[in-house]
Image (cartoon, helix red, strand yellow):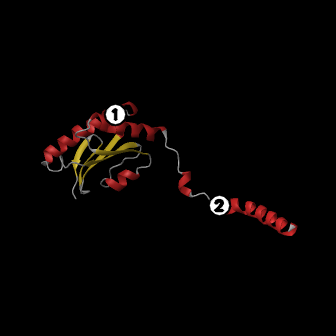
């Protein structure tokens, strides 16, 4: 009887020693993502403020600080640099701008971009130097872009 009790104590203590090794293992990499910077948090706040200010007719926007110019290479025509700028990826989620003529499309894009800019103005020197933007339809058709103070139409 004493042998069985001693054996169960030994086996139980061994199981307690091995459980932490079996349970913890390696920590998944997604838990070590980088913390957001102050710029990231400010841009998220600006997005929320823009949506709250224009709840009935806002564009679906995503604001990014493009430190290395990747967004410009991905979304804009060649030769348009977004390095060191705030990049605005806007989607016409209600198809209000998409159904307009080219002149009206550029005018509405300009008005929308100026409304967005009011929320990021404190961290920029001017819209012409510090902001680049692209506008897509809900069908992911590129419509227009803004860079260096000029608005341009994009072809599909």
Q: Residue at x 37, y 47 (%)?
A: 82
Q: Which residue is mark 1?
A: 119
- Residue under numbered circle 2: 23
From the top left corner, tell me how far across and down residue 144 is, in percent.
Answer: 23, 49
**Element type where label 1 sits in the image:** helix
Residue ID at (40%, 52%): 70
* Horizontal side of residue 64 vs 55, given as left or right: right
Q: Is residue 144 left or right of residue 12?
A: left
How many neighbours does mark 1 have within 10 angstroms: few (below 14), some (14-19), or many (20 or more)? some
Q: Secondary structure at mark 2?
A: helix
Front residue (pair 129, 132) = 132
Q: Earlier in the sequence, mark 2 or mark 1?
A: 2
- Residue 98 numbered mark, or none: none
| Residue 62 shows up from this direction | yes
Vertical arrangement, residue 23 with respect to residue 102, above or below: below
Residue 127 in sight from this viewpoint: no
Tell me the quarter of the image containing the C terminus: bottom left
Q: Give yes or no for contact between labels 2 and 1 (Cβ–Cβ under 8 Å).
A: no
For the image, the number of numbered tags is 2
Residue extending farthest front: 1
**Mark 2 burial class by Cα count in 10 Å: few <14, some 14-19, many 20+:** few
Image x and y of residue 134, in percent: 29, 48
Query: From mark 2 to mark 1, how far is it between C-alphas?
Result: 47 Å
Residue placed furthest toward the top: 122
- Image coordinates for residue 119, horizontal then vertical, percent: 34, 33
């Amino acid at each position: 009887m004493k042998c069985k009790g001693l054996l169960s104590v030994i086996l139980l203590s061994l199981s307690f020693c091995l459980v932490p090794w079996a349970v913890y293992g390696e920590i998944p990499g997604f838990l070590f993502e980088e913390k957001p910077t102050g710029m990231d948090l400010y841009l998220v706040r600006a997005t929320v403020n823009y949506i709250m200010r224009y709840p009935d007719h806002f564009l679906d926007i995503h604001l990014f600080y493009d430190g290395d110019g990747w967004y410009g290479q991905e979304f804009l025509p060649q030769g348009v640099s977004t390095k060191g700028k705030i990049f605005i990826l806007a989607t016409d989620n209600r198809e209000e701008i998409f159904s307009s003529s080219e002149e009206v499309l550029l005018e509405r894009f300009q008005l929308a971009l100026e409304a967005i800019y009011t929320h990021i103005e404190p961290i920029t020197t001017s819209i012409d130097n510090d902001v680049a933007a692209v506008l897509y339809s809900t069908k992911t058709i590129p419509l227009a872009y803004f860079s260096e103070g000029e608005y341009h139409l994009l072809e599909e």
